[in-house]
């Protein structure tokens, strides 16, 4: 760990809602920063003007706050265009950026030719041979250059926080385009400028960025060399990287960013608890057990070195299991504002042990406090009428179910499932659920009698 306080960044593009893939990256950054006494910057990488939307940026911030992932600094790339332009000029002056004029069709044809010659389909750097006269002629014909970064002929090596020693052979990679012909900057470039100028110390992101990391380290060196003593400049090699293996679905396929059922908004709508989502994603792909840990416990135990080098499968059943455990230990005071206004502590204590999702609590409130239509059981009509007639007078407490079913069993010679299952169906409309001893006092005698009568047909 460096002597200085770590600074990490979560940098989503506001082109859609958060989903479990990029949310896992956010969780890793926040937990790592908090464990090591550092800070997190939320940076909106919104230079894609065509796809970035204000509503997505607002949604990302709202979702992170709902999860309790609070950031210490904020930045927006669209407000820093002048910084990218200045950095680009330095790279042009130092010879690290060079103009290109080939069209997409020309580049595609070159790739085909290289493949036919059994050469790697990387850019051939033909534009490095462009003379000033040729460039002037191209521009006179209405062409506008885009700009490539000239990679150094070396192998970039770093010690990855997750994957151990990693390397990227730059001679096997095409010189990346950093500036489009319309003058807009690409992510590869803007991210490096920001990370250097804001003093980011650690970058935690997905394994699909491995090649980007090699390129960006080389770019850091180039910027550092071109303007080492400029304000905000950083020494090359001052950033530590960690790459989390990608998430897959249950069948091993890559999770799609547009897989709506796995967006945070969908999980939230389904009633999943923020602490359950954080606890699951914090240990997904880790050697540590999946446990319904508190936020502080997660911070104290978070260790990137415990992460597997293999892809991790997102399993909704595991997430649901953690959610269930967390719900079962929540107090009435912690959930009262999410229950119907007239719901009581007795109700919450009765139902919480049977909830998978918080949204199910409202269904149980409807069952105990409102009118429902129980299933008709004509074959049980005599039994249900007898059950209605044997209902004890109120007031009812937790002992009333035992008194009632004991009397009913003695009267009908029934026991076990034949005794309790018809009663549960008639009283709740459900095959299973909270203990009847807790539900009966909430349902009340009049409502119970009416349901038994209706179920009897």
Image (spheres, rainbow, N blue to C red):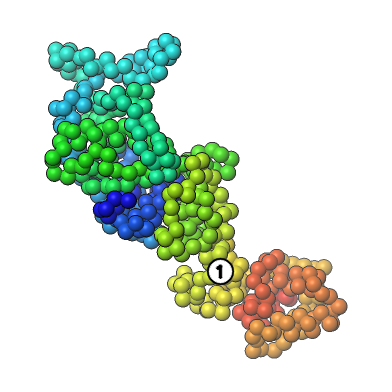
Q: Nearer the viewer, residue 217 or 446?
A: 217
Residue 148 appears at what percent x and percent y?
Answer: 26, 25
| Rendered view: 206 above or below 446 | above
Q: Is residue 245 visible?
A: yes
Q: Secondary structure at mark 1?
A: helix
Residue 369 appears at what percent x and percent y?
Answer: 58, 76
| Rendered view: 190 above or below 265 | above
Q: Residue at x 28, y 57 (%)?
A: 72
Task: Decide if residue 90 is on the left or right side of residue 41.
Answer: left
Task: Decide if residue 39 is on the left or right side of residue 79.
Answer: right
Task: Decide if residue 437 is on the left or right side of residue 267.
Answer: right
Q: Residue at x 42, y 10 (%)?
A: 117
Q: Residue furthest right?
A: 413
Q: Is residue 447 visible?
A: no
Q: Nearer the viewer, residue 192 or 334?
A: 192
Specify the quadrant of the image occupied by residue 454. Answer: bottom right
Q: Residue at x 15, y 36 (%)?
A: 227
Residue 385 appears at what percent x and percent y?
Answer: 78, 78
Q: Which residue is mark 1?
A: 328
Q: Residue at x 20, y 34 (%)?
A: 223
């Amino acid at each position: 760990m460096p002597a200085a306080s770590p600074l990490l960044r979560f940098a989503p593009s506001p082109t859609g809602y958060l989903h479990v893939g990029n949310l896992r990256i956010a969780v890793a950054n926040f937990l790592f920063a908090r464990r090591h006494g550092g800070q997190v910057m939320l940076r909106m990488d919104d230079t894609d003007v065509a796809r970035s939307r204000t509503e997505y940026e607002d949604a990302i911030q709202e979702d992170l706050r709902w999860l309790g992932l609070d950031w210490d600094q904020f930045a927006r790339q669209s407000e820093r265009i002048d910084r990218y332009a200045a950095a680009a000029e330095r790279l042009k002056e130092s010879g690290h950026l060079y103009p290109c004029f080939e069209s997409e069709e020309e580049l595609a044809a070159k790739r085909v030719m290289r493949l036919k010659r059994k050469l790697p389909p990387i850019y051939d750097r033909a534009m490095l041979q462009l003379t000033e006269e040729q460039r002037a002629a191209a521009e006179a014909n209405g062409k506008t250059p885009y700009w490539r970064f000239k990679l150094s002929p070396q192998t970039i090596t770093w010690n990855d926080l997750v994957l151990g020693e990693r390397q990227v052979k730059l001679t096997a990679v095409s010189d990346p385009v950093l500036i489009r012909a319309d003058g807009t900057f690409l992510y590869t470039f803007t991210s490096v400028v920001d990370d250097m100028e804001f003093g980011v110390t650690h970058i935690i992101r997905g394994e699909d960025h491995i090649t980007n990391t090699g390129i960006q380290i080389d770019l850091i060196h180039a910027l550092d060399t071109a303007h080492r003593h400029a304000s905000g400049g950083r020494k090359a090699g001052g950033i530590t990287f960690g790459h989390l293996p990608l998430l897959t679905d249950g069948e091993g396929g890559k999770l799609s960013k547009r897989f709506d059922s796995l967006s945070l908004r969908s999980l939230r709508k389904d009633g999943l608890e923020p602490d359950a989502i954080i606890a699951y994603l914090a240990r997904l792909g880790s050697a540590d057990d999946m446990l319904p840990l508190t936020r502080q416990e997660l911070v104290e135990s978070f260790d990137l070195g415990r992460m597997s080098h293999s892809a991790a499968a997102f399993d909704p059943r595991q997430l649901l299991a953690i959610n269930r455990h967390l719900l079962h230990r929540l107090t009435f005071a912690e959930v009262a504002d999410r229950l119907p206004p007239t719901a009581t502590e007795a109700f919450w204590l009765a139902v919480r042990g049977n909830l998978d999702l918080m949204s199910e609590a409202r269904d149980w409130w409807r069952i105990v406090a409102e009118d429902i239509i129980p299933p008709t059981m004509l074959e049980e009509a005599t039994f249900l009428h007898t059950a209605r007639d044997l209902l004890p007078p109120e007031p009812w407490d937790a002992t009333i179910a035992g008194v009632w079913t004991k009397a009913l069993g003695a009267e009908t010679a029934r026991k076990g499932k034949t005794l309790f299952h018809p009663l549960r169906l008639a009283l709740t409309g459900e095959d299973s659920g909270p203990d009847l001893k807790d539900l009966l006092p909430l349902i009340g005698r009049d409502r119970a009698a009416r349901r038994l009568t209706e179920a009897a047909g």
